[in-house]
Image (cartoon, grey):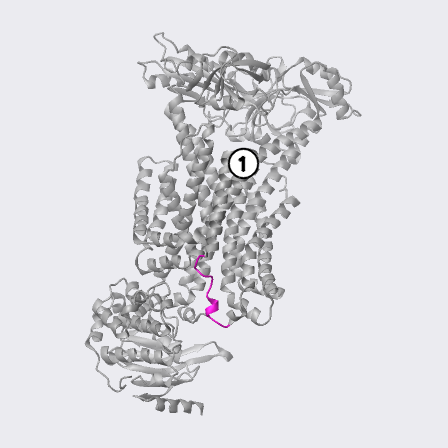
Amino acid sequence: MLRNPTARRPTAPEIGGRAGRDPPLVSTCVTATTESASSTTVAARAVAASKVYGSGEAEVRALDGVDVEFERGRFTAIMGPSGSGKSTLMHCLAGLDRLTSGQVFLGDVDISKLSEKQLTIVRRDRIGFVFQAFNLIPTLSALENITLPESLAGRKPDQAWLDQVIRTVGLQDRLKHRPSELSGGQQQRVAVARALASRPEIIFADEPTGNLDSKSGAHVLEFMRQAVTEFGQTIVMVTHDPSAASVADRVVFLADGRIVDEMASPSADAILDRLKRFGD
Amino acid sequence: MFKLTIRSIWAHKVRFVFTGVAIILGVGFMAGTFVLTDTVQKSFDDLFTGSLQHTDAVVRGEEPFEGEFGENQRERIPETLIADVAAVDGVAEVAAGIEFTAQIIGSDGKPIGGGGPPTFGSNWSEVRDLNPFCIVDPEPRQGECNDTVVPSGNQVVIDAKSAEDGGLAPGSTTQVITATGPIEVEIIGVANFGFGDAAVASPGGATMVLFDMETAQALAGAPGEIDTVSATADSGVSQNELRDRIATALRGEPVEVITGQQLVDETKDTIGQLLSFITTPLLFFAGVSIFVGTFVVYNVFNIVVAQRTREMALLRAIGASRSSVLRSVLGESIAVGLVASVLGFGFGVLVASALRTILGGAGLSVSSASLVIAPRTMVVSVLVGLIVTIICGTVPALRASRTPPVAAMSAAALERTSTKLTVGRLATGFVVTGLGVLLLLLGLFGGGDAAIVGVAAGAVLIFIGVFVLGPLIARPVASLFGRQPVGAFVMIVGALLIVVGPIYAAMDPSGGRIALAIVAVIGGLVLIPAGRSAFGIAGQVGRENAMRNPKRTSAASAALMIGVALVGLITIFAASLEAEVDATISRSIRADFIVANANSFSFGGFDPAVGDAVAMRTGTDPDDVFISSTALRLGQVKVNDLDTAQFLGALDPATFADPESPEALFDFGLERGSLDLGPTDLAIGANQADDLGVDVGDTITLGFARTGAQEFTVTGVFSEVALSGYVISLDAYEQNYTEQSDFQVYAKTRPGVSPDEARDVLTAIIEPYPTLKVQNQAEYRDEQKSQISSIVNLIYVLLAFAVVIAGIGIAITLALSVFERTREIGLLRAVGMTRIQLRSSVRWEAVLIALLGTALGLAIAVFFGWALIRALESEGFSTFVVPPVAMLIVVLVAVVLGVVTAVYPAWRAARLNVLQAIAHE
């Protein structure tokens, strides 16, 4: 059912063309940043990223000097045991949390320097989210949830693109329904559609299948894979499920706040083997 | 479990503090009223006990009947009685007293006081033990009072408050105006009333001017007469003994003899009665605040328990019994109630202390004695607070105790209060509302002693019934009001206010207009962002949130509903009353000009010389300016065997006998008989005639203070009661009343004489009387209406308490809702909702809750108002007006209130940490 993870496509032109539509606020940030030659191929990257909780005896280094890049048009999975810092890394990359030291770039923009307000706009206009659960606003219909970021920005969604996304995730006949009237799998598909609808530069997914049965989970992963393969979307997914990670083009392994390994085009078995070695 | 109760309160301290505030304000209002009135009563008690401490017996005229406001209607007694009393064995010293209406003019030429407390003239007594006044300026050389100063002729002593207010001091000269005309006086002394700590600048805020006895009698128009003789007893003679001896000596005279102690008790009673005119409304409005607070507390307890379902279930799962869960939750309510009512009591003491200062500033000086905190105040405060919280805590506690233990494990069972309306709820709502309507109408139309109870119980039931039914309409109303056109309308009104306010003030700059303009601009500045919130996804989220749980929305708005219902009722009633006054005056008064007291709250009469001077210019001579004129005199009279005295008006019958004649000043709307009144004829209002069961040709007994019971013949029955329900001729008045002073003078301009010329003539006539003013009919009408609005404004202030509590209710409910939606808010923020948008959506939700409460409240107000006016139809009310502008203002104020209540919850929502919010359970 799932496509061959190795069947990749180059960056879709419409994604690259997005920079011209950036609101002035973010453009200002672009001029303020320093980097870099790799900006055309790298969607997001962390440079010497450290995140420290507490101090003294109780100090916990959730991230300890992480350097990592996420290429455009690729599907990357972040894996690691509990407490390895994988969620923290994602939160910092996505502008939900701030680093203690180091930098996070979204395209050319050093988002670690942005104000709270600017970060909100960046999240709205340039990042898509899929959370493990409670992804949708219960008072809004499925369609309203899908177009939420565009509505927040006060923009009309691109109808053709919206239709395509909705068709892809197979929600045509559920658009008027409230989240409580949808199954868990359908809710996650709405969440994926929302993440895609605003054509963000990057989508961050935090255990998107964690609360689903395997069949629904497979569906959701399929759509994410499709988004990368067919639309050239960039996706970074945190997961602890090897079979979910096997859909990705690349897997990055974290342990104790550091990148310890990575694999390209992994199979579920290879991932499982690698994970087992963390126990050693 | 007790430990758990305490822990739980501590864990949720913020919400309990808010809940407490709702109780603290209501209980504080009540406790404050008690403390204040106890303090005022005590200080007056001390004052009169002190100032009358040496008075052992008092002789005064008999009381034929009691006035409508409990005042005396005694005739004066001859001064020869002074010697008779002095001659009685056992009498040590005697002093006579006489009192009359007198208005002191301040150094600025304006009358002092008169806005409420009376303005008196009296005589100075040289008997120290029998004189409650104590001259402090010029300062006494020895002792407490300067008794070397004794007024004589045009020299006077005035009270210290009048001296301060009027900028007067010993040595100043000024005018005093009495019913016998203006007189030039020289102030030689300024006196306190009472002695030592109990001394005040003026007795109850009244202005006092004290002459020598002979001058006082002349000014009172009662030469040779006095009001009272007071006496002190020789040592060894008791008060009762002295009273009996004097009574025996004066047998046969039309007098009454009482002991000093009786006078003190009587005075205390009178003050108590007067205070109850203040206390009763204050307690009523305190009750309203507590009632409104009850809804707030109930709502909060309900939500808090619902939010803790999982915790309750866990307790049950690990073995807590139902009753221990019940006790734990109820215990929390009781603890909150106890703490809040004690705090409320303290708050009340503070309020009373502040109010005392304000009252002192406003003229009602209260002695410097400390606040009186009666045990009753403390007990009632705590009881009320406890009862409210126990009532409010019971239902949520029962619900908590019914939580199934499995709810601890399964998320499905956690689903909070269902949003579905049960048939039982609907039935209960309709039955309670219907019962309330029935009781209200029975009370209003049935009459009888229980009427007021019926009305109150009916109103309370209607509020509860509508509260129960509220969820039924909460959704559609929120859905309707939540739309963008409503927001656009609010924004437009806001913009208009900002533009029109300053223009209005600039057209004719005055303090009042500038204040109004500032209010308008501030209101506009709040309304624009409020309306703006309706737009975009933020507005949609706000609207959806207001719709998602109709029970919650409706409960949050219930308290405001009650406040708005009362505000609306008062507004509608006042508008109807104003329309009624307007119509009645237009229909029944044909006079072009009215001379009246400048202070519209003064009922004191003025010099008949004014009316005479107007009469001099009335007629057909070439220099006459008026075609007709008459004085209006008012008096109290006992009608047949009615318990309370009635107001009676006296006029020249020629000015109202034939309303079609060019000389007519009045049209009383004659129904039967004739209005051409002779000296023993009476015209009576139709309602009064019905009540007494009399008609044209019947005889009525009128009891007068001076002449006793007199037979009058009913010659006419009229329908327009613009002045009084009982009208006699001026001739009859002169025969039956001692004091001949005018209340108003009416005049109609001769054809061909310009209004300005007529006004100039009147202005010249009243020139020596700064207490009088000339009004044309329109001005008179406006003034009558403005008296209504000044009372209405006072009621608004008292209701503001309830509205503030209602606002707190909305704020807590929203804050709790925000807490409940933490994860949702986190998600919204994660996908790019800005803090501004988030605050905007909370604001719009708050505005919708406020609008819901306002819509329900106004609907109830219209019903109450309509029922009230219908019930008063028999009293001559016929106009029912719902003023659209005033209603719009109520709505706009509600929108502003919504914005204000959203400040705290919106701030809480906006400052949530996005990551933590997403991870929130």
Q: Is residue B431 magenta?
A: no
Q: Main secondary structure of the magenta part?
A: loop
Q: Using residue B89 as the reference point, say whether residue B669 is left or right of it.
A: left
Residue A40 seen in the current view: no
Q: Using residue A230 as the reference point, say whether residue B183 is left or right of it.
A: right
Q: Using residue B488 as the reference point, say whether residue B665 is left or right of it.
A: right
Among the 4 quarters of the image, the one containing residue B286? top right
Q: Using residue A11 as the reference point, say whether residue B546 is left or right of it.
A: right
Residue B916 lies, in percent from the top left, at: 43, 70
**Observer-nearest residue: B339 or B307?**
B307
Q: Is residue A91 above or below residue B853?
A: below
* Residue linked to disc 1: B451
**Observer-nearest residue: B845 or B196?**
B845
Q: Is residue A239 above or below residue B439?
A: below
Identify the residue shown where x is 43% and y is 61%: B818
- The magenta span reads B409-421
Amino acid type of the residue tagged 1 in the rendering: Ala
Pick the quarter of the image with the N terminus of chain B.
bottom right
State the count of labels.
Answer: 1
Callout 1: 10 Å neighbours few (<14), some, many (20+)?
some
Residue A177 lies, in percent from the top left, at: 33, 66
> What is the chain letter for disc 1?
B
Q: Which residue occupies the extreme right position in the image?
A: B236
Residue B276 lies, in percent from the top left, at: 58, 35
